[in-house]
Image (tube, rainbow, N blue to C red):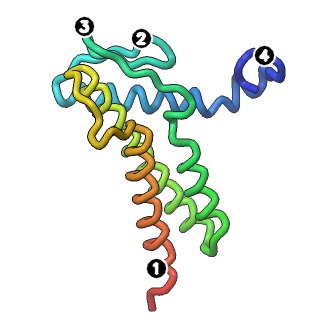
Amino acid sequence: MSAPGNHYSPFVHHYLDYPSWLRQSLLQGASFFLGLLGYNTVITDAYHLQMVNGSWVKLVYACLGVGVMCFWLAFVLANKGKFVKKITWLLIGLLGIWLINVLRIMLVLLANNKHVKMPLGLDNHTFFNILAYGAVFILMFLYDRSFNKK
């Protein structure tokens, strides 16, 4: 509904377009951390992060990690806990998933720039899913355990 087409809504486009916000935060985050490591990058448009005079990565919807974020969101909201505790755990999980995704984007850009292939013939989405869902399962365990303290 936020992209022009059959079911376009200007309201959704201007106020509820979370994929664009998430994409920009991931691109900005990866660019920022790569800059701290001494790499010069530029965000060329709403989808691309590029090494200056080097390779680039493109973040489409499938790269945003929305599925794993929604999984974590649903788990926390469906479980017991007071509002403040749920918000705290939501933020911890979403920030963790975001950081894993930023790290993946950074590593993919660096690997592309050095022409390094992904190990075991897997793509970067598979590696992200393994790390992100692994982190979520650990968070689920810790969340559940936080209610069993006496």
The CA span between labels 3 and 1 is 49 Å
Mark 4 belongs to which amino acid? Gly
Q: Secondary structure at mark 4?
A: loop
At x 70% / y 29%, what residue is drawn?
15
Mark 1 belongs to which amino acid? Arg
Mark 3 belongs to which amino acid? Asn
Q: Is residue 122 left or right of residue 85?
A: left
Q: Nearer the viewer, mark 3 or mark 1?
A: 3
Q: Which residue, given by chain and number where applicable, does mark 2 sit on?
A: 44
Q: Residues within 10 Å of mark 3 (few under 14, many from 20)?
A: few
Image position, residue 138 (x, y; %): 41, 66
The numbered mark at residue 53 is: 3
- The residue sitting at the right extreme is 6
Q: Nearer the viewer, mark 2 or mark 3?
A: 3
Q: Which residue, given by chain and number where applicable, does mark 4 sit on?
A: 5
Q: Which residue, given by chain and number where applicable, does mark 1 sit on?
A: 145
Q: Nearer the viewer, mark 1 or mark 4?
A: 4
Quarter of the rendering containing residue 113: top left
Q: Are marks 2 and 3 in contact (CB under 8 Å)?
A: no
The CA span between labels 2 and 3 is 12 Å
At x 53% / y 26%, what residue is drawn?
60
Mark 2 belongs to which amino acid? Thr
- The residue sitting at the front extreme is 121
- The residue sitting at the bottom extreme is 150
